[in-house]
Amino acid sequence: MLKVKDELPVYDICTFRDSDHAHNEIVAECFADYLKKHPNLHRAHGHTFYHLVLFTKGSGFHTIDFERFKVEVGQIYFMVPGQVHGWQFEGEMDGFVVNFSEELFHSFLRDERYLGRFNFWRGITGENILTLTATELKEAGEMLSALVTETSAVKPFSKDKVRLLLLSLFILVARSENYPTEANESVKPNLQLLYKFRDLVNEKFKSLKLPKDYAEQLHVSANHLNAVCTELLGKSAGEVIRERILLEAKRKLVNLDESISTIAYSLGFSDNSYFTKFFKKYTGMTPEEFKKSVNDY
């Protein structure tokens, strides 16, 4: 099903499933075939499911949550539900694409937040893109090729095999030579605090706007939280919160056919004019101007 709200379409996984598709919770295909079936996907759109693409051929650009990235052979990217992206490809493209629902792993993994252990599934743009080495690309290609075959029919233990292939791919990427190295022992506690802070921001940014509110829930001082963010991200805790609010505002503005005042209220702003001033201060555009600009995105 395709839901169109304002300018930007939002797809659920049924959109990409053939009527005779063997599995309800996952679609895995060669990327060239996928693009032929869905030629309009180059325009900005959102998903209600998890999505990954591995490029094995082609060039151009793709945009995730309003940030632009150059396509490279061996590059793999990951998107969580709610993110927005589009493509501008050059020449013939190929690789693999996998779409899967949130429910795929629910009955399989005891920890429902297991995917969050992989940084690339945290929905943070820039941390969800990686270029594999030649050896890793070959191994990933073999896993994804097996996944395409496995999802083409239902066999005994087929669903478990699909899950295991996906988890093997995630572990391969997490162990990649190009993946950010593990922090040394002195940095690890701060890194764990940062992860918890960003997870908490993602959960409560609509109601909590100040670093001190998060610091209190994390049982640290606001100064310590700010120092950790500055050390590991090069930005303050306040900036992390503000960027998450702005990202959600942009997603809502291009996804929802709602008034600016309704969006402002949903983001925790009691005053529409304050939301407009806040948005323009940090983006250079009013919400209305940004909404109109989405056609050029």
Image (cartoon, helix red, strand yellow):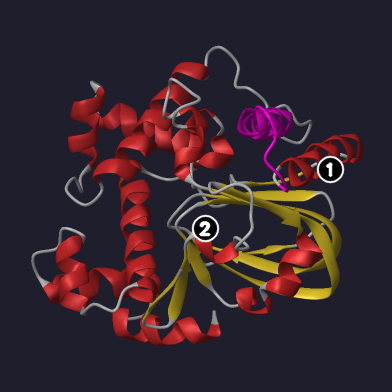
- As measured in the structure, the alpha-carbon distance from the residue carrying label 2 to the one carrying label 1 is 23 Å
* Rendered image: mark on residue 131: none
Q: Amino acid at mark 1?
A: Gly
Tag 1 secondary structure: helix
Residues shaded magenta: 152-174
Q: Is residue 297 above or below residue 183?
A: below
What kind of element bears circle 2? helix
Residue lying at the far left of the rendered structure:
270
* Residue 31 appears in view: yes
Is 181 rendered above or below residue 54? above
Q: Quadrant of residue 189?
A: top left
Residue positioned 43% across, 38% down in the render: 230
Of marks 2 and 1, which one's residue comes earlier in the chain?
2
Residue found 79% across the figure and 37% down from its top: 143
Classify the position of the C terminus by image quarter.
Answer: bottom right
| Residue 243 pos. (x, y %) | 37, 55
Task: Using the image, determine if residue 26 lies above or below residue 36.
Answer: above
Q: Residue at x 64, y 75 (%)?
A: 42
Q: Amino acid at mark 2?
A: Ile
Q: Which residue is mark 2?
A: 13
Q: Residue 105: x percent and y percent?
A: 50, 33
Residue 180 visible in image: no
Q: Which one is in front in this view, the residue at disc 2 or the one at disc 1?
A: 2
Q: Residues within 10 Å of mark 2 (few under 14, many from 20)?
A: many
Which labelled disc corresponds to residue 141?
Answer: 1
Q: Which secondary structure is most common in the magenta stretch?
A: helix
